[in-house]
Image (cartoon, grey):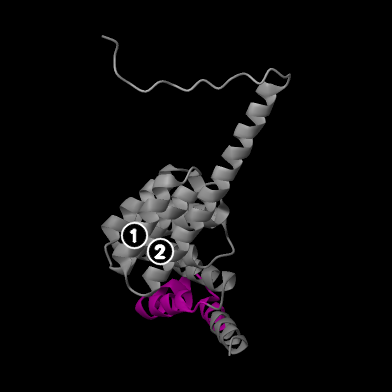
């Protein structure tokens, strides 16, 4: 008895030249359309995730990002998804879970400069929060190499160095952080706290208090510009 099953419908040959080429072109057009639809769907999931995040619905936000990761066919987009998941975990102070998400993003070796910077920076930040300061240092230095014009990695590297007892280097990082972006006052705050706790670093940086005043002036000027 023959095996039960549906018969495959045979597409009759067109009988004209160029049929193979036409079929290839059609396939390519359909693939392009499918990619466009997929990209639009990924963007919609991304927007929904951040909308839920802003409203405090982190579980739903994570669900949207996980769905996006499942269908994304671009390593950079997938890395962005894991980066977002890590940021959501940071919101609930689950730094171990955030670190795991950032590690997955890092393994994808994102090419996009923005994504690569924050993957390295956020890995370093979480390692700092978990008191793994020596490990954090390498990622934060890499983040600065990727984009030396952002403040956050300088500030985080300063924290890493300060916790390792390398206070002079930490002070220099905080100063560089203010120079990179004076509109963010966190690097200045860390610098002031460091000098207050360790005034002896002025011996290693003779113009430390002059640089401190310059940082204060820069932050104040940036604050004035935004008001």
Count neighbours of disc 1 (C-alpha within 10 A) and say few if under 14, some if 14 to 19, many if 20 or more.
many
Kind of element beneath mark 1:
helix
Name the chief secondary structure element in magenta: helix
**Drawn side of residue 112 relative to residue 45, left or right:** right
Kind of element beneath mark 2:
helix
The residues bearing labels 1 and 2 have C-alpha atoms spaced at a distance of 7 Å
Q: Residue at x 28, y 56 (%)?
A: 97
Q: Over which residues does the magenta segment extend?
A: 184-213
Instruction: Reply yes or no: does residue 157 show up in magenta.
Output: no
| Quadrant of image for the C terminus | bottom right
Closer to the camera in the image, 9 or 145: 9
| Quadrant of image for the N terminus | top left
Q: Outermost residue toward the top?
A: 1
Instruction: Reply yes or no: does residue 195 show up in magenta.
Output: yes
Do the CB atoms of the residues marked 1 and 2 lie less than 8 Å apart? yes
Q: Residue at x 55, y 44 (%)?
A: 35
* Residue 164 in view here: no
Residue position for label 1: 62
Q: Is residue 154 above or below residue 54?
A: above
Residue position for label 2: 49
């Amino acid at each position: 008895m023959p095996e039960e099953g549906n018969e495959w419908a045979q597409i009759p040959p067109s009988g004209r030249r160029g049929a193979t080429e036409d079929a290839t072109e059609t396939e390519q057009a359909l693939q392009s359309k499918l990619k466009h639809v997929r990209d639009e769907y990924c963007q919609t999931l991304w927007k929904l995730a951040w909308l839920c995040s802003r409203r405090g619905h982190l579980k739903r936000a994570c669900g949207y990002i996980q769905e996006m990761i499942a269908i994304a066919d671009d390593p950079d987009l997938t890395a962005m998804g894991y980066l977002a998941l890590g940021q959501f975990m940071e919101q609930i102070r689950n730094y171990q879970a955030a670190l795991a998400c950032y590690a997955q993003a890092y393994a994808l070796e994102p090419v996009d400069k923005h994504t690569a910077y924050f993957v390295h920076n956020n890995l370093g930040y979480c390692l700092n929060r978990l008191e793994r300061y020596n490990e954090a240092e390498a990622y934060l230095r890499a983040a600065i190499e990727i984009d030396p014009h952002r403040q956050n990695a300088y500030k985080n590297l300063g924290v890493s160095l300060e916790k390792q007892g390398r206070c002079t280097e930490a002070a220099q990082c905080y100063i560089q952080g203010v120079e990179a972006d004076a509109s963010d006052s966190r690097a200045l705050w860390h610098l002031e706290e460091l000098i207050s706790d360790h005034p002896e670093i002025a011996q290693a940086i003779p113009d430390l208090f002059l640089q401190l005043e310059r940082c204060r002036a820069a932050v104040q000027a940036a604050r004035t510009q935004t008001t």
